[in-house]
Image (cartoon, rainbow, N blue to C red):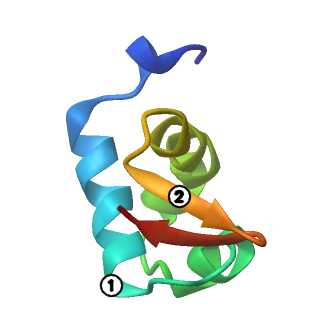
Amino acid sequence: MGGSEAISPAQRRRVLAVVRAFPGLTAAELLAATDSATVRSWLPQVLRNLRECAIVRVEEGRYWPT
């Protein structure tokens, strides 16, 4: 998978819901907080996409919804 076209709106919604439920966690902490193995498998890529699209912001390695 490469580029933002490979990330579905459903994946964005699921990962954004995790960030909103656990604001201020690092990527590793978000992975640990996620109970879905499916979400964990693509969470890093979707987090990167959400950051590039300014849907989440990163401060000192911690993710926050915008």
> In x, y percent, where is residue 44?
63, 50
Which residue appears at 37% of the width and 73% of the height?
Answer: 18
Residue type at numbered disc 2 = Arg
Give 49 or 56, whichever is nearer the viewer. 56
Q: What residue did someone put label 1 on?
A: 21
Mark 2 residue crowding within 10 angstroms, few (<14) / some (14–19) / many (20+):
some
| x and y percentages locating residue 55 in the rendered image | 37, 48
Q: Is residue 54 left or right of residue 3?
A: left
State whether residue 38 is above or below residue 48: below
Q: Give the CA separation, mark 1 to mark 2.
A: 15 Å
Label 1 close to label 2 by CB (< 8 Å): no
Quarter of the image where one finds residue 26? bottom right
The answer to which image quadrant residue 60 occupies is bottom right
Q: Residue furthest right?
A: 60
| Frontmost residue, 16 versus 60 | 60
Identify whether 55 is placed above or below 26: above
The amino acid on which the numbered mark 1 sits, given as a three-letter code, is Ala
Residue under label 2? 57
- Marker count (numbered): 2
Q: Nearer the viewer, residue 54 or 47?
A: 54
Q: Which numbered disc, 1 or 2, marks the residue that appears first in the sequence?
A: 1
Quadrant of the drawing holding the N terminus? top right
Residue 32 position within the rendered picture, expressed as x and y whole percent measured from the top left: 62, 83
Q: Quadrant of residue 54?
A: top left
Position above or below: 38 against 20: above
Q: Position of residue 51 (x, y in %)?
A: 53, 45
Question: Can you tell which mark lies on residue 60?
Answer: none
Is disc 1 surrounded by few (<14), some (14 to 19) or many (20+) residues within 10 Å?
Answer: few
